[in-house]
Image (tube, helix red, strand yellow):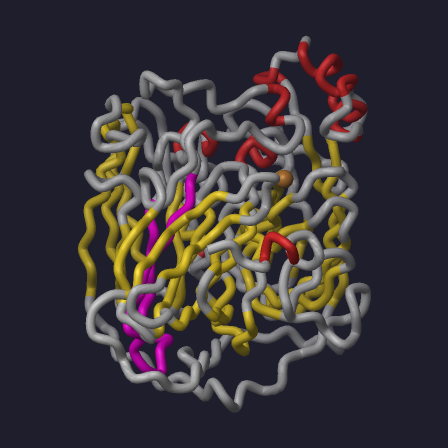
Amino acid sequence: MVGRRDFLKGLSATALVSAAGATGLLARPAQKASLGQRPLSSGGRVHEWTLVAKERPARLLGPSGPLTPVWTYSDPVMPVMRVRLGDTIRARLDNRLAEHTSIHWHGIRVPNAMDGVPYLTQPPVLSGNVFTYEVTPPDPGTFFIHPHCNESGQTGRGMTGVLIVEGDERRQPDADLVLAYKDWRLGKDGAWLDMETPEGASRAGTFGTVRSVNGAGSATGAVVPNGDIRLRVLNLDNTRIIEVGIDGADAFVIAIDGNAVEPFALDTWRMGPAMRVDILVRAPKAGRGFRVVDYFGSETWTLATYEAAGTALPARPFEPDLLYASNLPRADLQKAERMGFTFSAASGSITEAAARLDPDDPLAKILLDGLCVRDNTFWAINKASWPAGQHRELPPPLGLLKAGQSYVFELSNATPHPHPIHLHGHTFEVLSATRLKRPRHFADTVLLQPKERIEIAFVAQAGNWMFHCHVLEHLEYGMMGYLRVV
Ligand SMILES: [Cu+2]
């Protein structure tokens, strides 16, 4: 099953290229007549969950491998939780870790007090304490949860879970499968390696040693021949960028970060940490199969292999309009206020010189080898670095915004590394990008390529909202701030 994608890899990230080209405003998709308006939600259930954050033994190196002391919310590593649009989640976080934690509902437009950022939106949930979150997700889609403290340490050891809000489908697919990607930093004995290194934190991040989907290994399974298979792919890794493609079947992108898009044929889709993509695959005929592949690195890696088996559905045209159109607030671009944010190395330090060097430059390694990472910030937004240490002292906000006002942010990357930039509490529209071609779309995290400029637009909601890179060491070492919206 060698596809043409190896050949195409590197030419462009997605098949859809706007007529305006890479530097212009991307074409706004035609009003989504083909997707249609979503009916009012039929939810209304209240889900009472208890999420016990604690250390549990798990076999991350396979069923006969050694045990690793993972930190998780539940017995299954990386649980998949499903609710319906309109439902309310009442989640009791019981912290039995030795350090404080929280839950951030990534991509969900929550009230600010439920956003799970210690010191900014709530006190930290101390060891032995309980905090109850109440969230009624306003949008359907593919989301996830994670803590917002010691992120490389806690999420790196497993503190994450997939949260699916159902209710976006015009018709049911023949299967709905979750592929949650995450590396583990493990020795061969199953013991944790250091989650952070100065070399990694100051450059592209400290990579895991073992790649995995849904907790361990690659996924495998059977699908109905000629079936429509919805794949929800999440990049929940601390660091790694993946570029997902399908080998052996036709596939369309149907949602980005949980938000329905006008479907477009998938070549590959590049995803930084925290980004999600929903793909609709037409399964092949019986006896054949398809693979979900990461084409980003020099060596490809197979996330999942599916065989088509059993009674076939009749052959029919592949219609990818599975979802209703998303129904999100849209910025008024005529009246929008513009603000610029530059993502760079922290200034005035040896790390600045190192971080500006090409990642492979041996001088960068020499400069960084003598540093103590704990006392440093490596990264900055608009020259301000989130303070090192315990995050107890809040810096001033990166911007003061007005609730209800439309904004266009221009994001500029002054580093040689990609940064997946995430804004809490909002779903923004990606208007334009100078390097990586992609359609105009809604997202909560956008991958800013080296030297790239991207414009995003949104309507500001009241609260203090984090705004940061989602490479976890980048945010831990300075590339993080917040916006105050009043
Ligand atoms: Cu970054």
Residue at 70% x, 70% y is 17
Residue 279: % across, % down: 45, 66
Residue 272: % across, % down: 56, 47
- Name above or below for residue 17 compared with residue 39: above
Ligand number 1: quarter of image: top right
Residues in magenta? 161-182
Q: In the figure, residue 148 lies in which quadrant?
A: top left
Residue 355: % across, % down: 74, 28
Q: Nearer the viewer, residue 24 or 245?
A: 245
Residue 415 visible in this rendered orientation of the protein: yes
Residue 136 visible in this rendered orientation of the protein: no
Magenta-span inclusion, residue 241: no
- Name above or below for residue 477 compared with residue 427: above
Magenta-span inclusion, residue 164: yes
- Name above or below for residue 146 compared with residue 407: above
Residue at 25% x, 22% y is 66
Residue at 60% x, 69% y is 441
Residue at 39% x, 23% y is 186
Answer with left or right where residue 142 lies relative to residue 423. left
Residue that sits furthest to the bottom in the current view:
33
